[in-house]
Image (cartoon, rainbow, N blue to C red):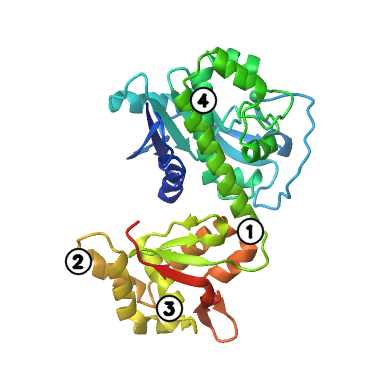
């Protein structure tokens, strides 16, 4: 059964491929596919909504329901919070258009990842035509982790629900609306409860009985629960890692030096070829580099980029290296801030201090401070 994962133009390529990375290794009837076409939402009707803090945390509108906060909300959200919202119909229409334009069969899923909020204030929503959308932003409110985990969880749990329930009324009749059991069918009207659901990675007894009663295909169920379990394990090892007081070991694997955090359950930090070039320049020069000296490192940048570059366009290659090694171009600063943002979102602000490239105010040099004894290299073809 094919599952086409598509994204709107605001969802970053990194996030998209990271979500796909969590799914593609699972074995079973669900075959996940990416697509490079971007979905534009500009032509859909936007509703501007201003949410109070309570509204923001609450799915649909359930009156007289008080919310407990278990997380510090010190993020850059001010309440009342203004955002653009799309109707579920508008988002599902985009899935359906993709289905028609790409000749996708009735038995296949089309799943849209979108940065846009929806008027239901739900994390995800699916219909009987196997069209599903998943809201990819605002996760930092609910889980202290890289949002690719909960998004991948939503992908498989929505597939399960669409296949298991006849329609939204049937879902409403079986979902756990007023309690949170740590089950895939917890409604989580208080959106903060989603974290429990992910960490238990469970399907409760009642739902298991329903799955048997409705002859839900076993191979699909096994594949879905395996993905849950894998995500739970990764999530927990990354969480343990972020609460450490010391940095952990890093392996740069293979010719293209995939960056693997060994003490975070082999978590891979995905860097682009140019980001890797910049990162390894600083790894290889532990004493640091002053911004205005970057021109002296042109040859080193060029030989690093040659390892990672996967194209054939020599002019483009040269242009990228010229830009990186030019003090007056902001190319290198852009790469540094993107690398640092990726590292912070993976390992958390505190531990990231050791891994990021930052300016040492004592000597004005940019450095990565991690103890080089924690770094190892392994050449393999994986
Ligand atoms: Zn259940």
Distance from the alpha carbon under mark 2 to that under mark 1? 40 Å
Say which of marks 2 and 3 sits in front: 3
Q: Secondary structure at mark 2?
A: helix
Percent x, y for residue 194?
65, 36
Compare marks 2 and 1 and give the one earlier in the sequence.
1
Q: Secondary structure at mark 4?
A: helix
Q: Secondary structure at mark 1?
A: helix
Compare marks 4 and 3 and give the one earlier in the sequence.
4
Say which of marks 2 and 1 sits in front: 1
Q: Residues within 10 Å of mark 3 (few under 14, many from 20)?
A: few
- Image position of 128 with respect to 203: above or below: above
Residue shown at the point (33%, 72%) measured from the top left: 304
Task: Read off the residue under disc 4.
Answer: 160
Residue shown at the point (50%, 26%) measured from the top left: 221
| Depth check, front residue: 54 or 244 | 244
Percent x, y for residue 180?
72, 30
Residue shown at the point (41%, 38%) measured from the top left: 7
Quadrant where the C terminus is found in the figure? bottom left
Distance from the alpha carbon under mark 3 to that under mark 1? 25 Å
Disc 4 and disc 3 in contact, CB within 8 angstroms: no
Which disc is residue 242 wearing?
1
């Amino acid at each position: 059964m094919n599952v086409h994962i598509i994204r709107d133009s605001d969802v970053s390529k990194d996030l998209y491929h990271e979500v796909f990375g969590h799914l593609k290794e699972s074995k079973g009837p669900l075959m996940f596919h990416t697509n490079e076409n971007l979905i534009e939402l500009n032509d859909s009707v936007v509703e501007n909504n201003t949410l109070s803090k309570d509204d923001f945390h609450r799915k649909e509108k359930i009156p007289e329901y008080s919310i407990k906060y278990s997380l510090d909300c010190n993020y850059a959200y001010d309440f009342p919070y203004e955002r653009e919202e799309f109707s579920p119909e508008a988002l599902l229409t985009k899935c359906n258009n993709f289905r028609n334009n790409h000749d996708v069969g009735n038995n296949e899923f089309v799943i849209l990842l979108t940065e846009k909020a929806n008027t239901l204030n739900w994390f995800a929503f699916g219909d009987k035509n196997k069209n599903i959308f998943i809201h990819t932003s605002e996760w930092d409110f609910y889980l202290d982790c890289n949002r690719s985990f909960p998004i991948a969880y939503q992908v498989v749990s929505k597939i399960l629900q669409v296949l298991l329930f006849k329609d939204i009324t049937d879902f409403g009749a079986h979902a756990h609306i007023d309690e949170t059991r740590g089950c895939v069918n917890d409604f989580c009207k208080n959106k903060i409860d989603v974290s429990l659901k992910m960490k238990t990675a469970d399907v409760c007894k009642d739902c298991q009985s329903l799955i048997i009663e409705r002859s839900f295909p076993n191979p699909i169920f096994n594949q879905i629960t395996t993905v849950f379990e894998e995500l739970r394990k990764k999530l927990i090892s990354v969480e343990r890692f972020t609460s450490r007081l010391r940095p952990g070991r890093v392996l740069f694997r293979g010719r293209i030096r995939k960056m693997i955090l060994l003490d975070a359950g082999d978590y891979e930090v995905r860097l682009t070829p140019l980001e890797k070039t910049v990162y390894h320049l600083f790894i290889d020069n532990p004493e640091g580099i002053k911004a205005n000296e970057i021109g002296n490192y042109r040859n080193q940048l060029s030989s690093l980029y040659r390892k990672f570059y996967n194209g054939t366009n020599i002019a483009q290659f040269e242009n990228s290296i010229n830009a990186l090694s030019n003090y007056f171009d902001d190319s290198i600063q852009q790469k540094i801030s993107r690398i640092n943002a990726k590292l912070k979102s993976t390992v958390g602000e505190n531990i990231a201090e050791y891994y990021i490239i930052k300016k040492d105010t004592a000597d004005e040099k940019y450095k990565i401070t991690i103890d080089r004894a924690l770094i190892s290299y392994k050449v393999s073809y994986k």
